[in-house]
Amino acid sequence: MTKTAWVFPGQGSQALGMGIDLLNLPLAKEKFIQAEEILGWSVTDICQSDIDTLSRTIYTQPSLYVIESIIADILRSKGQQPDMVAGHSLGEYIALYVAGVFEWSAGLHLVKRRAELMDSAAGGMMAALMNFDREELETVISATPNVVLANDNSPAQVVISGTPEAVQAVMSQVKAKRAIPLKVSGAFHSHLMKAAAMEFQEVLDSVIFQSANVPVLSNVDPIPAVEAETLKQRLSQQMTGSVRWREICLQLAENGIEKVVEIGPGNVLTGLIKRTAPSLILQNIRNAAELPE
């Protein structure tokens, strides 16, 4: 059997109309109803509204959680199972759910609160840098207060996060092929999220974690783990910690994974994996049409 990992994208992968083709499937219909009871709004309505509404953190994160978990559940109902899981930022919550670490509704409650706190964390800035000198970037970041490497996505793509002044200072000093400010409400995955992270910790403490039934590669520590306490500890650091996606890609290959399936809209993660671990077989399951018979 081919050793397979399932990976789950986070904010930035959302697309208008996502998840709508799942509505005809009984398993999905039930989950969408359950989600509306927890969230107080309809995921399918938001996904059919407009891109500005869907792209608001408060709506994006719960919508992605619901849709990606539904696709994963349908795959499992067809007898498929991953040998390892990982998710990018928000995607880690779907990875933990699929690994049996917490109940689906508990995960959605966590994501709802996370999205609310992150949506209200104003005053920061994030920017993506493509094709740069890593040594130069690290030198400039270490010499600039209030900015961090937030997402280490691939050898050629990173995201920096911090105060607007600090982020712009790094962008002006580091030679990059492209540097793009991101449309986000705050400086996610940085020390500026500390107050939100402390508030979120209260919700996280109330959720019971089980040991995972497959190894999970966490954003803040890409070494595979199954212990409930370890996974909870790593998740509690995630809002202020860096997303070490490049290292996760390397760990997949090192742990004998041969194939990676990205579950959810877009193909951001398979694109990043291709640059870091080109030997892996890649597949995308974005919608009902791409589900196996």
Image (cartoon, helix red, strand yellow):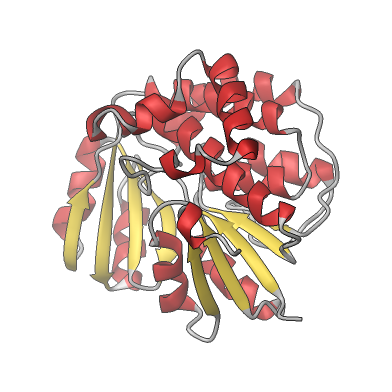
Q: Is residue 137 above or below residue 165?
A: below
Residue closest to the eye, 145 or 147: 147
Residue closest to the eye, 90 or 266: 266
Q: Position of residue 106 (x, y in %)?
A: 70, 27
Q: Residue at x 51, y 79 (%)?
A: 277
Q: Is residue 211 above or below residue 116?
A: below
Q: Position of residue 116 (x, y in %)?
A: 46, 20
Q: Residue at x 44, y 77 (%)?
A: 274
Q: Residue at x 29, y 59 (%)?
A: 140
**Is residue 57 visible to the viewer in this orientation of the structure?**
no
Figure quadrant of the C terminus: bottom right
Q: Position of residue 202 (x, y in %)?
A: 67, 19
Residue closest to the eye, 23 or 287: 23
Q: Residue at x 53, y 86 (%)?
A: 279
Quarter of the view holding residue 172: bottom left
Q: Could you tell whether 92 is left or right of 211 in the image?
A: left
Residue closest to the eye, 113 or 159: 113
**How many dots with numbers?**
0
Q: Could you tell whether 23 is left or right of 11 in the image?
A: right
Q: Is residue 74 above or below residue 236?
A: below
Q: Position of residue 108 (x, y in %)?
A: 61, 28
Farthest-out residue, left: 172
Figure quadrant of the N terminus: bottom right
Farthest-out residue, bottom: 279
**Is residue 202 visible to the viewer in this orientation of the structure?**
yes
Quarter of the view holding residue 137: bottom left
